[in-house]
Image (spheres, coloured by chain):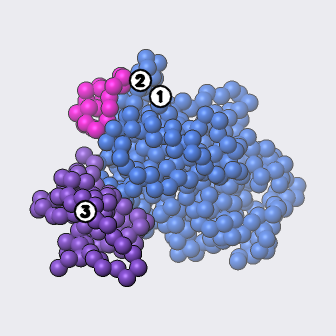
Amino acid sequence: MEGRILDHPILNFTRKKRVKIFFEGNEIEAYEGETVAVALHAAGIKVLRYTPINGRSAGLFCAVGKCSSCLMEIDGMPNVRSCMTKVKAGMQIRRQHEKGDLV
Amino acid sequence: MMKHASVVVIGGGIVGSAIAFSLLKMKTKNVCVIEKSYVSSGSTGRCAGGIRQQWSSPMNVKLAMRSVKLFEEFEKDVGMNIEYYQGGYLLLAYTDSEVDDFEKNVRMQKSQGLDVEILTSNQIKEKFPFINVEDIKLGSWCQSDGHANPQLANIAYAIAIRKMGGEFLTHTTVTGIDVQNRQIIGVQTDNGYISTKIVVDAAGFEAPKIGSMIGVDIPVHGERHQILVTEAVNHFLDPLVINFNHNYYVRQTHHGSLMMGQGDANPASGEDLGNTIEFLEEMSEKMIKDFPLLKNIHIVRQWSGAYDMSPDAQPIIDESKDISRFIYATGFSGHGFMLAPAVGESVAEMIIHGQTVTTDVSNLKMDRFTIGIEREHNVV
């Protein structure tokens, strides 16, 4: 099912260019201008990472870059806020486990 | 609040708490700690938590080694896990004079029985491949050095003091000390009066304020130092790394965040606990150069704390010549936390026996300032 709002009573959404991104190696469609979290949400992906200590699933919470709930590994970099990061063609996105590795 | 105390300790930071804990452990009754704010509100709660034994004078090395022994026993002795981690300390040398100093210090430290060694630049690269070793001549490495969480340690002591029957007063300010014929008779606070014959001044950079109440001059002043902390990442950095040449230290906390600080070029007074954007810029720039893997890490926050600086950057632990049984332990100059357990033990012994038994701290007496001082070099 399409997770995007297609018809809004007040606002008009103009779609930008369609791009391909990769979630856990699988291709997903996204639109330029969207954040990673939104593209994943639209594709039905709700679990974005696992909490470091108890390994519980965590997903989108504040959606404005404050809460750390949506941290993901994007293009090899851990702790990226997927709700604040815009999609780019070819982006490799992975769910984050633990606190993320620098080395 | 007790009406009479055998000893009143002024200052509930790590030093005052360690002293009170040691007194109680040595079976002294009616020990009272007076803290003007909450536990760990002062320099202890702002401290980076490094615990090292690599010092430039034999007595400082001995004192630090005793402290490490007590940190190793801390959880059993005091009753709390304080995230103590013996991941080592790595000191980096960039100049010929640093190389000479390090080699001389390591020889001396070894003669004191410390497990310390010189690492070549290649050995550093091998051990810690993420450090940029460009221009590093050598390093000084001690595995039994480490770090812990100072706030937890302070809280652990406060809880233990109360459990052992001591009094730990918070939010209580000392307003005066009563003296008659050079003998202490009591301490006045904003919450009441406590009669006592023995007072320990462990008020950190504010120790001179307490001394001045009874005409005792303590040559200590507060100097602001800043720290920043990053987001948490998986553990990768075992040691606390000190770079005197680039003027910083860095460690990874148990939580995974990286905590780092420097000595500012023109530090503000300890009364001013603000912080600056310049600090963030300076730290970031040099850390990215020496630890390139940190280039994308987020800074979470910054804060500052006061070093209680003495004229030679070494502690002052002594009993006043003018006022009987007025003892002070201050001037730790940024390394009070790491020495606290051993200092607590030494000061408790001074109070009970009139002299130290376990560790000699006579190099830290006040009269050294009239005899002539040798500054401790290994300070950031």
Looking at the picture, tell me which residue is in the foreground, A2 or B69: A2
- Range of residues picked out in magenta: B116-137
What is the x, y in percent for residue A24?
14, 61
B202, above or below B142, in the image: below
- C-alpha distance separating marks 3 and 1: 50 Å
Q: Are marks 2 and 3 on the same chain?
A: no
Q: Residues within 10 Å of mark 2 (few under 14, many from 20)?
A: some
Q: Is residue B120 covered in magenta? A: yes
Looking at the picture, tell me which residue is in the foreground, A17 or B33: A17
User: Which mark is on residue B94?
Assistant: 2
Looking at the image, is mark 3 or mark 1 nearer the viewer?
3
Looking at the image, is mark 2 or mark 3 nearer the viewer?
3
Q: Are marks 3 and 1 on the same chain?
A: no
> On the picture, is A93 further left or further right than B83?
left
The secondary element bearing badge 1 is classed as loop
Q: Is residue B311 covered in magenta? A: no
Label 1, on which residue? Answer: B245
Residue located at (60% from left, 49% from top): B275
Residue located at (31% from left, 42% from top): B293
Kindly identify the amino acid type of the residue bearing the numbered disc 1: Asn
Q: How many marks?
A: 3
Q: Which chain is blue?
A: B
What is the x, y in percent for residue B349?
58, 53
- C-alpha distance separating marks 1 and 2: 7 Å
